[in-house]
C-alpha cells in the first residue's frame, strides 16, 4: 500500500498496512532555521523499491520497507525489515512504522542523528515488548536503515538484512564489498564497486559467536532458518544495541542498496551494485535486483521455493541539486514497486 505523509509527500511501505492515520510514516522534518548551513548544497536523491512475496513458504510477504525524503531533499530515510515467525509481518510492520516515527520526532535529530537513530531502534524494541508481547514471543524482524542527513549517511542494523554502497572506482572507499571486485559500468559510463555498510549479524561471524558464548548462550545446528543472532522483537535482541556507523557522502558515492536476505542469499553485494549501476531509474534497479534473486531461488530449488525478496535503492546525483518533482508512482508489474523521483 502507499501512504501519504506530512505535507502531502507520498511514503512507500510495501507489505505494511497501517491501522490508523496516527501510525502513518511522515517525511523527515525540515531543519530549523537556527541550524541551517547557509548556502550549503547536497546531491539530489531519487528512491525506488521493489518487493516480491515468497513462494512455497506460506504466501504472506513478511518484509516491510520505508522510503522517505524531506521536502528539501537533504534528509532521507530508507529501511528494510524482514519479519520472521508466525507474527513476523505484524512485527516488521510495527518496527518499520515505529522507527521512522520516533526518529523524525526525536529532539536531537538535527544535532545528533546517531543518537536519534539509536534511540529509535531501542524505542521500537521497547514498544514491541509493550504492545506486541504475544506476537513477538516467537517472532521478530531484522531492521537495516540508512538515514541520510545532508552530506552524511547513518546506517543502523539488527539482523542479516544488509546495506551496500556503490561508489566510483579510484575513490578513497574501502571495505569487504570491494575486495576482488571489478565493478560494472554505470548508466553514466562510470564503474562502481561495492562497499558493505553493515555486517550481517549471523552466528558464523566470529565476533557474534564469541559474544553469544561469553554471555552464557549456546549455538546449535538447526534446520529452522532463523540465522540472525540479533533482531527486534525476539528475546535475542533484548539488551543489545543496534550496530550504527556514520559515513560522509563523498563525490564518488553514487548509490545505496538495502535488501532483505531474500536478496543477499542469492545475489552478492558487488553483483547487486553491478545490476543497479545499469539503471538511472532506482525503481528499475530495485526491480532488476529482486528479479535476479527470484530467478536464482527458483533455479536452486527447482521452482519449489523462494523467500520474500525486497530491495530499496537510493541514487545520489552529485551533478544536480534537488528540485521539485511530481509525486511518486507505483509499478504495474507482478510485484509491488514504488519510485520516488528527486525531491526538493
Image (spheres, rainbow, N blue to C red):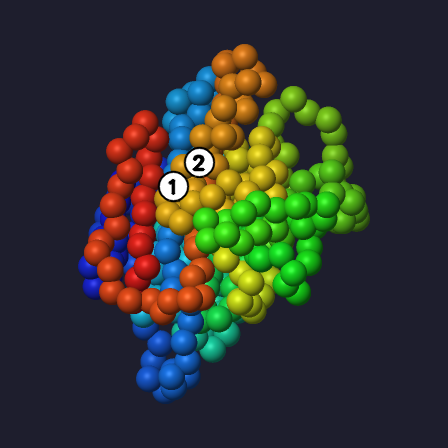
Residue at 61% x, 51% y: name it: 193
Quarter of the rendering occupied by the N terminus: top left
Q: CA distance from mark 1 to mark 2?
A: 6 Å
- Residue 308 x %, y %: 46, 30
Secondary structure at numbered mark 2: helix
* Residue 303 left/right relative to 181: left
Secondary structure at numbered mark 1: helix
Mark 2 neighbour class, 10 Å CA radius: few under 14, some 14 to 19, many 20 or more: some
Residue at 44% x, 36% y: name it: 288
The label number, if any, that marks residue 127 in the structure image: none
Picture quadrant of residue 100: bottom left
Which residue, given by chain and number where applicable, does mark 2 sit on? 288
Residue at 52% x, 64% y: name it: 153
Residue furthest front in the image? 189
Q: Is residue 206 visible?
A: yes
Picture quadrant of residue 319: bottom left
- Residue 221 x %, y %: 73, 26
The answer to whether the residue labelled 1 contacts the one labelled 2, judged by CB atoms less than 8 Å apart, is yes
Q: Is residue 87 above or below residue 193?
A: above
The label number, if any, that marks residue 284 in the structure image: 1
Which of 221 and 53 lies nearest the eye of the viewer?
53
Residue at 50% x, 52% y: name it: 189
Mark 1 neighbour class, 10 Å CA radius: few under 14, some 14 to 19, many 20 or more: many
- Residue 191 x %, y %: 57, 51
* Residue 298 left/right relative to 220: left
- Residue 206 x %, y %: 78, 45
Picture quadrant of residue 338: top left
Quarter of the rendering occupied by the C terminus: bottom left
Q: Is residue 106 visible?
A: no
Amino acid at each position: 500500500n502507499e501512504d501519504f505523509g506530512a505535507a502531502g509527500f507520498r511514503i512507500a511501505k510495501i507489505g505494511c498496512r497501517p491501522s490508523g492515520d496516527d501510525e502513518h510514516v511522515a517525511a523527515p522534518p525540515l531543519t530549523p532555521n537556527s541550524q541551517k548551513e547557509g548556502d550549503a548544497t547536497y546531491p539530489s536523491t531519487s528512491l525506488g523499491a521493489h518487493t516480491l512475496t515468497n513462494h512455497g513458504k506460506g504466501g504472506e510477504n513478511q518484509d516491510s520497507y520505508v522510503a522517505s525524503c524531506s521536502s528539501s531533499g537533504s534528509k532521507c530515510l530508507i529501511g528494510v525489515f524482514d519479519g520472521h515467525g508466525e507474527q513476523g509481518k505484524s512485527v516488521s510492520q510495527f518496527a518499520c512504522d515505529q522507527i521512522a516515527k520516533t526518529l523524525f520526532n526525536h529532539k536531537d535529530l538535527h544535532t545528533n542523528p546517531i543518537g536519534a537513530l539509536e534511540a529509535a531502534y531501542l524505542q521500537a524494541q521497547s514498544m514491541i515488548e509493550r504492545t506486541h508481547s504475544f506476537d513477538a514471543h516467537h517472532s521478530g524482524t531484522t531492521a537495516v536503515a540508512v538515514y541520510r542527513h545532508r552530506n552524511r549517511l547513518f546506517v543502523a542494523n539488527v539482523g542479516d538484512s544488509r546495506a551496500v554502497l556503490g561508489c566510483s572506482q579510484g575513490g578513497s572507499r574501502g571495505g569487504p564489498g570491494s575486495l576482488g571486485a571489478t565493478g560494472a559500468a554505470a548508466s553514466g559510463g562510470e564503474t562502481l564497486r561495492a562497499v558493505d555498510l553493515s555486517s550481517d549479524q549471523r552466528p558464523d561471524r566470529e565476533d557474534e559467536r564469541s559474544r553469544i558464548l561469553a554471555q552464557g548462550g549456546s549455538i546449535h545446528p538447526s534446520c529452522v532458518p532463523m540465522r540472525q543472532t540479533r533482531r527486534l522483537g525476539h528475546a535475542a535482541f533484548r539488551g543489545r544495541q543496534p550496530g550504527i556507523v556514520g559515513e560522509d557522502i563523498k563525490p564518488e558515492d553514487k548509490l545505496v542498496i538495502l535488501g532483505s536476505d531474500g536478496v543477499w542469499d542469492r545475489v552478492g553485494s558487488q553483483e547487486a551494485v553491478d545490476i543497479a549501476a545499469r539503471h538511472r531509474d532506482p525503481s528499475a534497479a530495485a526491480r532488476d535486483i529482486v528479479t535476479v534473486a527470484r530467478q536464482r531461488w527458483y533455479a536452486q530449488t527447482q521452482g519449489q521455493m523462494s523467500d520474500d525478496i525486497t530491495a530499496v535503492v537510493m541514487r545520489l546525483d552529485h551533478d544536480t541539486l534537488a528540485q521539485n518533482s511530481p509525486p511518486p508512482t507505483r509499478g504495474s508489474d507482478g510485484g509491488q514497486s514504488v519510485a520516488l523521483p528527486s525531491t526538493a
